[in-house]
Image (cartoon, grey):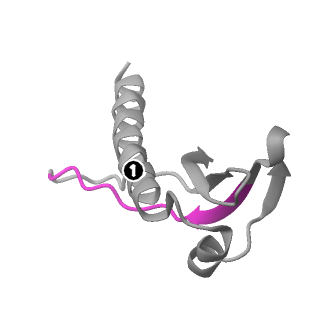
Amino acid sequence: MRTRQVFILLGLIIGMVGCSIQSNLRRDYKGKTQEELMLGMGRPTRIETLSGGRKIGIYEKSKFLKSAPINTGQFQYDKFESPKAIKTEIYKFYFNAQGLIEDVKYEATYER
């Protein structure tokens, strides 16, 4: 029961942080060209074409997260550490037929 609460809380925190990253990306890149995006983010991992001349530029970035000590603020004999994980961030930039960014999506997943 306690671990379920921790995972729900962690999911809510990640969800709130994910929303703020997506809104920042949307504000920074919406209406810009593909060339301006490549100057800021580099080459996309892959590009998918949609109907009507639209495209999606997808960037995938993975990062290994080491275990970190968890301090409970109490005297303890046992050492508590967070588990090691791999964080995968996926940025999706939707281009219209004119080559301008019309929407941005951000996703983050964690694997143990």
In this view, the residue in front, 97 or 106, is 97
> Eyeballing the image, is 64 above or below 26?
below
Q: Residue at x 57, y 46 (%)?
A: 107
Q: Residue at x 73, y 74 (%)?
A: 43
Q: Is residue 5 magenta?
A: no
Q: Position of residue 61 (x, y in %)?
A: 65, 63
Q: Could you classify mark 1 by the number of other residues whose Cα lies within 10 Å: few (under 14), some (14-19), or many (20 or more)?
A: few
Q: Residue at x 61, y 81 (%)?
A: 39
In this view, the residue in front, 87 or 76, is 87
Magenta stretch, residue numbers: 57-73
Q: Which residue is mark 1?
A: 23
Would you say residue 69 is visible in this rendering? yes
User: Helix, strand or loop at disc 1?
Assistant: helix
Would you say residue 87 is visible in this rendering? no
In the rendered structure, the answer to whether residue 48 lies left or right of residue 70 reads right
Q: How many marks?
A: 1
In this view, the residue in front, 90 or 49, is 49
Q: Is residue 64 magenta?
A: yes
Q: Position of residue 32 (x, y in %)?
A: 55, 65
> Eyeballing the image, is 72 above or below 38?
above
> Eyeballing the image, is 29 above or below 106?
below
